[in-house]
Amino acid sequence: MSQYVLQAQDVAIHYGGVKALDGVDMTLEKGQIRGLIGPNGAGKSTVIDAITGRRPLTRGKVTLMGQDVSHLGAVERRARGLSRSFQRTSIFHGMTVRAQVELASYKMGMQNSAEDAEAVLRELDLDRLGHIVAEDLGYGEQRRLDLALALVGRPQVLMLDEPMAGLSVKESHDLARHLKALTSKWDVSVLLVEHDMDVVFGISDVITVFELGRVIAQGAPAEVRANPRVREAYLGSTA
Ligand SMILES: Nc1ncnc2c1ncn2[C@@H]1O[C@H](COP(=O)(O)OP(=O)(O)O)[C@@H](O)[C@H]1O
Ligand SMILES: [Mg+2]
């Protein structure tokens, strides 16, 4: 059995002539945070779509806890513990926080959905906001609710597509702290696509850099930061 919770091997997604992904290898260990960075159009969202089963692979293989899930649909992968968030939130604006997290948990088939939901709400400091209708939340809280919906049913793997987008510095650091806590308390493994370099370099155990659908660098944050190719391709003079 592999030591990896998740493994993507030689993953490719081609849209006609566009090679959105071309031969990507990536792994996640238990409780690890892997930051994924790269310029716009590099294939970051597409790799999440590929791994979670939203897009059929042109080539390659995805293994979840030792099992090949390449031919399973997104719903089935989610049921097996592979969860995600989208670049835009997936919250229900007209529903209270608690009701929608409970509903999400129930839909996941959790027998104890009220308990499951409560644990998630507590973990994200949303329990005191449980009675609030989502559209009345601040944007930072809506982002946290979006994360809560991805966490029902205790997934093993969480793939987050720019969860800090539009947040203030304080809100970003808050969310980062919650993510870090989740990895240690719940053993969740996280793939974090994020533009905020302070956050990515601050909380990731390892970092992967994409360019034009390929991995151009991979390693510990300090190593990646020092990589000349990365500095040239992405970090520029601001790093
Ligand atoms: N549905 C699609 N049809 C055709 N090309 C697409 C589609 N989705 C994404 N692409 C292309 O795939 C590449 C990667 O996109 P994406 O994964 O969204 O990049 P990122 O998230 O890193 O900004 C881009 O060149 C984009 O134009
Ligand atoms: Mg994207």
Image (cartoon, rainbow, N blue to C red):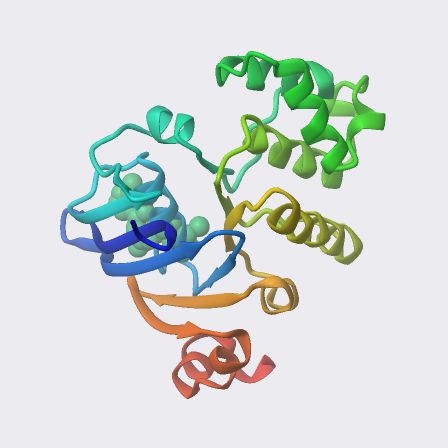
Q: What residue is shown at x 60% (from left), y 80% (from top)?
A: 238
- Residue 237 is drawn in which quadrant? bottom right
Where is residue 99? Give x, y as percent.
69, 14
Which residue, as the protein is rendered here, is positioned at the far front?
Answer: 1
Tell me: residue 186, above or below residue 120.
below
Q: Residue at x 72, y 29 (%)?
A: 121
Nearest the eye: 129 or 20: 129
Q: Please, is residue 159 above or below residue 133 in the view?
A: below
Measuring from the top left, give residue 208's x and y in whole percent: 42, 66
Most foreground residue, 71 or 40: 71
Relative to 180, say whether 129 is above or below. Answer: above
Q: Is residue 163 left or right of residue 52?
A: right
Left or right, 167 with respect to 90, comes to right
Residue 22 or 61: which is nearer the viewer? Answer: 61
Give the quadrant of the C terminus.
bottom right
> Which quadrant would residue 149 be assigned to in this image?
top right
Residue at 31% x, 35% y: name it: 53
How many numbered marks appear?
0
x and y percent of residue 159 in the render?
A: 47, 45
- Return the residue nearer the eye: 2 or 133: 2
